[in-house]
Image (cartoon, helix red, strand yellow):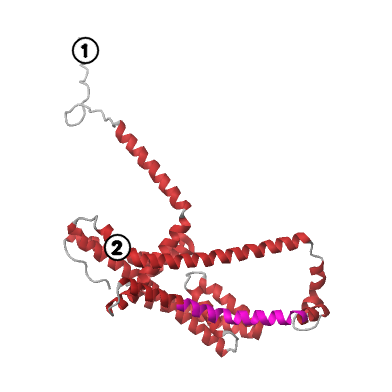
């Protein structure tokens, strides 16, 4: 009787022997060090996120001001003098803006302080434009019932508000001087970084850097142009409806219009409040409707036309970049979405041309 033969043991495919895989301890240690270093860098970046955002803002402003600096350099000025003149023009514009904006506020505050005794007397008797607050809501009696804790809480809120305003003003001044330093030394820093690139790729890196600077500068220029139009339209609407402080309110709307998503809404609320308190609800409603109509024109037509010419992006790319930026980084992300998309377009065109061994086509 025959017995069944056992099949031979299976061998690895290819006929070779199984080779054990070993990872050197040095590789594991290197991986651990890289992971720990990445975690530490992320933690430092998160801790210094405010400074990093201010530095990014300074770089963007420096790129936006670079065409003006180059224009002064073309007139024969040296780099330092051209930067100084452009920075001086910026400071002068800010001072003029502050004067136009704060002058009506100071005037109204002075009048309020001068008329405060009469206003309080009329209010306590239920007379005057604010008399209804006493007759309907008995605001004087309620004010007398406030205890020390309520007054302390109110003073604490006021103190926090003042501290926030002072902190914001300090941040603005810091960003301005940081922008000045970036303009003065940014070109040397950029050339030093380009020096680390092999000789054959430096031309492409410089071209990509110039393209990114052009995209960022174009975005800032376009944003300023759109905001100027928004402020001008607001001033015309307020002038036509006889709402006071048309120029100051137009400047406020222009500033808030720089912020995507929520800026135009905040500006409209401020304007509507002033219009309602000075000219009545009917005038305020007319102003709000007119500003909403303009906002629709701005969002659906003006932005597409301006950014297509300044950043060379399609309307679809503009809408997607703002939406994605807002989803990832909120208001700041929406603000940086369009220039980031323009930079990606420049870099991708350069990479495609590098793979093909040709120069990139002009961005249109």
Number of callouts = 2
Quadrant holding the N terminus: top left
Residue 131: give its label: none
Which residue is at a point 22% across and 69% down the rendered structure image? 361
Could you classify mark 1 by the number of other residues whose Cα lies within 10 Å: few (under 14), some (14-19), or many (20 or more)? few
Q: Which residues are magenta?
A: 92-117
Percent position (x, y) of residue 358?
Answer: 17, 64
Snapshot quadrant of residue 340 = bottom left
169 over 111 or under it: above or below: above
Residue at x 69%, y 80% (from the top left corner): 112
- How would you rate the neighbour count of disc 2 (Cα within 10 Å): few for under 14, some for 14-19, many for 20 or more? few
Instruction: Please provide percent x and percent y for residue 71.
Output: 31, 78
User: Where is residue 144 drawn, in percent x and y?
Assistant: 81, 68
Which image quarter is the C terminus in? bottom left
- Residue 114 image point, x, y percent: 71, 82
Q: Secondary structure at mark 1?
A: loop
Q: Nearer the viewer, residue 290 or 268?
A: 268
Q: Quadrant of residue 179?
A: bottom left
Spatial distance from mark 1 to mark 2, Cα to Cα? 86 Å
Residue 361 visible in the snapshot: yes
Q: Is residue 177 in the magenta section? A: no
Up the image or down, 13 lies above or below 222; here it is: above
Looking at the image, residue 364 sits to the left or right of residue 165; the answer is left
**In screen coordinates, is 5 left or right of 214?**
left
Residue annotated with mark 2: 188
* Dot placed on the residue nearer the N-terminal end, 1 or 2: 1
Residue 115 falls within the magenta-colored stretch: yes
Of discs 1 and 2, which sits in the foreground?
2
The residue that disc 1 covers is 3
Is any atom of residue 320 visible in this view? no
């Amino acid at each position: 009787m025959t017995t069944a033969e056992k099949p031979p043991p299976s061998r690895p495919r290819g006929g070779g022997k199984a080779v054990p895989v070993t990872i050197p301890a040095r590789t594991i240690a290197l991986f651990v060090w890289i992971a720990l270093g990445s975690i530490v860098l992320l933690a430092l970046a998160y801790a210094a996120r405010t400074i990093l955002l201010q530095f990014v803002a300074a770089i963007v402003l420096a790129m936006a001001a670079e065409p003006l600096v180059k224009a002064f350099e073309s007139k024969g000025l040296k780099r330092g003098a051209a930067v100084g003149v452009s920075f001086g023009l910026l400071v002068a514009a800010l001072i003029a803006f502050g004067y136009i904006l704060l002058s009506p506020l100071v005037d109204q505050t002075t009048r309020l302080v001068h008329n405060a005794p009469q206003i309080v007397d009329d209010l306590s008797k239920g007379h005057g434009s604010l008399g209804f607050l006493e007759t309907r809501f008995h605001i004087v009696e309620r004010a007398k019932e406030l205890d020390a804790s309520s007054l302390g809480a109110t003073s604490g809120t006021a103190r926090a508000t003042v501290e926030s305003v002072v902190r914001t003003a300090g941040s603005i001044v810091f960003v301005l001087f940081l922008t000045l330093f970036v303009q003065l030394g940014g070109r040397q820093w950029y050339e030093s970084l380009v020096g680390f690139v092999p000789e054959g790729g430096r031309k492409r890196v410089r071209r990509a850097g110039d393209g990114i600077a052009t995209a960022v500068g174009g975005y800032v220029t376009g944003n300023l142009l759109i905001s100027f139009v928004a402020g001008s339209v607001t001033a015309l609407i307020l002038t036509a409806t006889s709402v006071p402080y048309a120029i100051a309110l137009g400047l406020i709307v222009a500033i808030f219009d720089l912020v995507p998503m929520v800026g135009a809404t905040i500006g409209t609320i401020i304007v509507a409040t002033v219009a309602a308190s000075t000219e009545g609800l009917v005038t305020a409603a007319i102003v709000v409707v007119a500003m909403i109509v303009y906002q629709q024109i701005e969002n659906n037509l003006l932005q597409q036309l301006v950014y297509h010419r300044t950043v060379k992006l399609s309307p679809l790319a503009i809408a997607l970049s703002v939406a994605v930026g807002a989803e990832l980084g909120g208001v700041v992300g929406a603000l940086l979405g369009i220039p980031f998309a323009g930079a990606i377009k420049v870099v991708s065109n350069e990479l495609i041309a590098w793979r093909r061994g040709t120069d990139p086509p002009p961005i249109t």
